[in-house]
Image: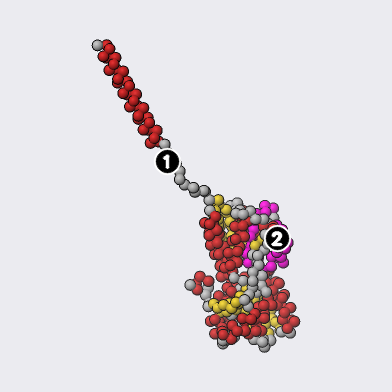
């Protein structure tokens, strides 16, 4: 009896042990995590602060193309450009606060759109040497931003929209060989206008052509200056890449067109906003190349001090065909006169921004 009882107990113990063993094996198999098949690598994030000087067609076009190109570069290289954008609207106090905000946010690089922003960022980064890439600075050497275009020498480099003033003035006399008086319309406070206006005076003096200077620092003053040039009886008006006049163009173009005075300017955005002609760089391409420089510094470790300032071919003439008609000029004749002096002659119609052209 005792033997049978003992056998039964042993049988029960063995059965229980076997069951536990099988359960344990089964449990271990279920809890084993599946091997990961993902090869994803976390994206590197670079913080970029972009400050625009004023709200105008050319500078806005630059910003839009910087942002789009950085987005494209980021997707292609598995990096993220975390962009903070602001516009100081030509207010020095606001500009300094924007830069302070960028620095407090510990951005990896700042982008300065236009000369005044670049100069403010240069002063603010003198000690910390945060890299700065400027865009649309007409005379970076004259503004004291770089030691040379080939070797900037510090923490700043970028793109220049240098204007070939003589090339623009050549177009005035190609269209009107008898032009006797040229108006010079600009803002004396704009660094980008200083060298081109001096060049224009030298050109006109050598040609024996009279010039009349009119200046303004805001829209109202620019309108008064344009009205004064009409009263002066000028045959044409020249404006370099002056942000103040660019911003005011929509307010003055009808005044000049109604008086039969063509406005020759240093950027296609002037023509977009109603000037007869804009001559200079492709600002969309300038924005793309600025973004490429930003990426090269942040992603590839390029040194701003040794990264040459990028300049562009200034050979494109943009003619506003609506203003051409309003001035009583035949576009085919104008195109034939301009073509030998330009890389390209293109047309545009009046709008507030390039995106409005559809």
Q: Decide whether the magenta segment is chiefly helix, strand or loop.
A: loop
Q: Position of residue 323 (x, y in %)?
A: 55, 82
Q: Is residue 1 depicted above or below 81 in this figure?
A: above
Quarter holding residue 279 = bottom right
From the image, tell me which residue sits under label 2. Answer: 152
Secondary structure category for the residue under label 2: loop
Secondary structure category for the residue under label 1: loop
Q: Position of residue 130 (x, y in %)?
A: 65, 54
- Closer to the camera: disc 2 or disc 1? 1
Region rendered in magenta: 127-154
Q: Is residue 19 visible?
A: yes
Q: Residue at x 42, y 39 (%)?
A: 33
Whether residue 144 appears in magenta in the rendering, the answer is yes
Q: Could you classify mark 1 by the number of other residues whose Cα lies within 10 Å: few (under 14), some (14-19), or many (20 or more)? A: few
Q: Earlier in the sequence, mark 2 or mark 1?
A: 1
Q: Position of residue 288 (x, y in %)?
A: 58, 64
Residue 113 - label: none
Q: Residue at x 65, y 78 (%)?
A: 168
Q: Could you classify mark 2 by the number of other residues whose Cα lies within 10 Å: few (under 14), some (14-19), or many (20 or more)? A: many
Which quarter of the figure is the N terminus placed in? top left
Q: Is residue 316 depicted above or below 331 in this figure?
A: above
From the image, tell me which residue sits under label 1. Answer: 34
251 or 290: nearer the eye?
A: 290
Q: Residue at x 56, y 84 (%)?
A: 331
Q: Residue at x 69, y 81 (%)?
A: 212
């Amino acid at each position: 009896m005792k033997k049978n009882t003992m056998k039964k107990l042993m049988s029960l113990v063995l059965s229980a042990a076997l069951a536990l063993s099988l359960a344990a094996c089964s449990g271990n198999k279920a809890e084993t995590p599946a091997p990961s098949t993902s090869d994803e690598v976390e994206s590197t994030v670079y913080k970029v602060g972009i400050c625009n000087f004023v709200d105008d067609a050319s500078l806005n076009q630059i910003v839009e193309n910087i942002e789009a190109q950085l987005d494209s570069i980021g997707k292609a290289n598995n990096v993220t450009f975390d962009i903070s954008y602001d516009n100081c609207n030509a207010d020095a106090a606001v500009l300094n606060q924007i830069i302070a905000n960028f620095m407090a946010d510990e951005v990896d690089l700042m982008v300065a759109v236009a000369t005044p922003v670049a100069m403010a960022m240069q002063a603010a980064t003198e000690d910390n040497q945060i890299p700065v890439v400027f865009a649309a600075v007409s005379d970076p050497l004259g503004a004291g931003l770089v030691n040379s275009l080939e070797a900037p020498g510090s923490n700043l480099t970028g793109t220049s929209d240098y204007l070939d003033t003589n090339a623009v003035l050549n177009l005035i006399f190609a269209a009107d060989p008898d032009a006797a008086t040229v108006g010079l319309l600009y803002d004396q406070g704009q660094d980008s206008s200083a060298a081109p206006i001096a060049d224009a005076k030298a050109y006109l003096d050598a040609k024996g052509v009279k010039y009349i200077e009119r200046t303004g620092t805001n829209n109202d003053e620019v309108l008064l200056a344009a009205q004064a040039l009409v009263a002066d009886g000028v045959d044409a008006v020249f404006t370099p890449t002056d942000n103040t006049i660019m911003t005011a163009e929509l307010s003055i173009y009808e005044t000049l067109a109604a008086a039969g005075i063509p406005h020759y300017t240093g950027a296609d955005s002037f023509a977009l906003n109603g000037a007869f002609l804009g001559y200079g760089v492709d600002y969309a391409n300038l924005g793309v190349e600025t973004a490429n420089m930003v990426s090269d510094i942040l992603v590839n470790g390029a040194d701003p001090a040794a990264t040459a300032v990028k300049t562009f071919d200034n050979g494109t003439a943009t003619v506003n065909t609506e203003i051409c008609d309003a001035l009583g000029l035949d576009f085919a004749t104008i195109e034939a006169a301009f073509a030998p002096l330009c890389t390209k002659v293109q047309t545009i119609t009046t709008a507030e921004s390039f995106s409005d052209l559809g």
